[in-house]
Amino acid sequence: MIKIYTGSMYRGRYIRYAALGLLSVLFFLSGCQSFLTKTPETPTVNVLPIPLASHEFSFDPFRDDVIGSVQVITAEHEDTLSDIARRFNLGYEEIISANPDIDPWLPGEGARIIIPTQFVLPDAPREGIVINLAAMRLFYFPEARAGELRKVVTHPVGIGRIRWKTPEGATRITAKNEDPVWIPTPSIHREYANNGNPLPAVVPPGPENPMGAHVLRLAWPSYAIHGTNKPPSVGLRGSFGCIRMYPEDIAGIFNNVSVGTPVRVVNQPRLLGWRGNQLYLQTYAVLEDDKRNHDKLFSKLLKATRSTLKAQINARPHIMINEALLGEVIHNPRATAIPVTLQDMTLLAYFNQAKHVQNTLPFNATWAGETDEQLTTAEVQEMANEESEKIR
């Protein structure tokens, strides 16, 4: 049989031969790798773990004084340290202290940010509410049934300015109010008037009310624990003596505490506590108007901590202090608990081994991520600068 090739058939054969020739050229140009076996690109998957909740913990009160863990995240392009603080239930001073070499307003994409969510519990009765002014942090200890681990809920707070100090001592909750009316005291009226911003006699509930939507009134006249209409002020000395909390945090505390709950306010910039077979030290910057001799106080605290019944458990009596690390933690307050009995350890090395987690809201976070009540970066920076001016 004679096959007749039409023009279209010749064109088809030509195209096939040309294609085979091109394949041969590409094969030789690519060496031993053929483009036909190219591995498809694998989509990027975030394999970092979700961050741990940073506000609610369980602990054994007979053995341990330390809760939480240090975490590390990688900053994104639009982050500020104030944003990250709110996300991880931290206050402004806490996040700044933990990251002294980071620009708070422009950390920079890819910057390594330490999240100081490891705490030594204050040296105070673990009942009701305990507030540590130096830490600018509240600890709430719900009642526990016999045989159960104790639970503690902790949140950052804002406290009184230097000339409007938050008092120390023991008090109690006397009333709970939602959507409170704010009646400024005469001294507050005078300050606002002197600044050219006179206040009305009564500030009704709403977005202009500095008490926020929830208030726990204390037995101390004119003092309370309340929310705020300026969330970035949490973690600063910016109030007229009251205790400010993030709106989402005060809502939870408000729902769980009752009238009569004891409240104790302490000022402890250096805290010692046990966990496992390690002694932890947590240090905060001493408040500007605190004139006590903290070196002498710490010597007494260290001696007392090592002589308690808790200090006699297992290998604790034989644990040696890493003096170099202890000195480093005292002179570089980083707002997180550091095990100062770890030998051959430095502050930098300890932070370098911290768990790296996703830069996202922690599991079971109190904040849902809304930004309606957030101030702009410029407003937050102005508040921080004003506070710096006041303490000079």
Image (cartoon, helix red, strand yellow):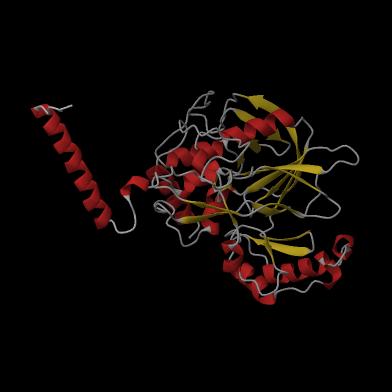
Above-or-below relation of 341 to 79: below
Query: Which one is in front, 184 or 311?
Result: 311
Which residue occupies 72% across, 71% down?
A: 296
Q: Nearer the viewer, residue 122 or 337?
A: 337
Where does the image place residue 196, in percent across and percent down from the top left? 39, 38
Residue 49 seen in render: yes
Q: Position of residue 9 (x, y in %)?
A: 14, 29
Q: Residue at x 66, y 25 (%)?
A: 177
Q: Quadrant of residue 331?
A: bottom right
**Residue 127 appears at what percent x and percent y?**
80, 43
Between residue 350 and residue 159, name the one nearer to us: 350
Is residue 77 found left or right of 9 in the rendered image? right
Give x and y (percent) for residue 31: 30, 59
Q: Identify the residue at the far front of this view.
A: 1
Visible residue check, residue 216: no
**351 and 237: which is toward the camera:** 351
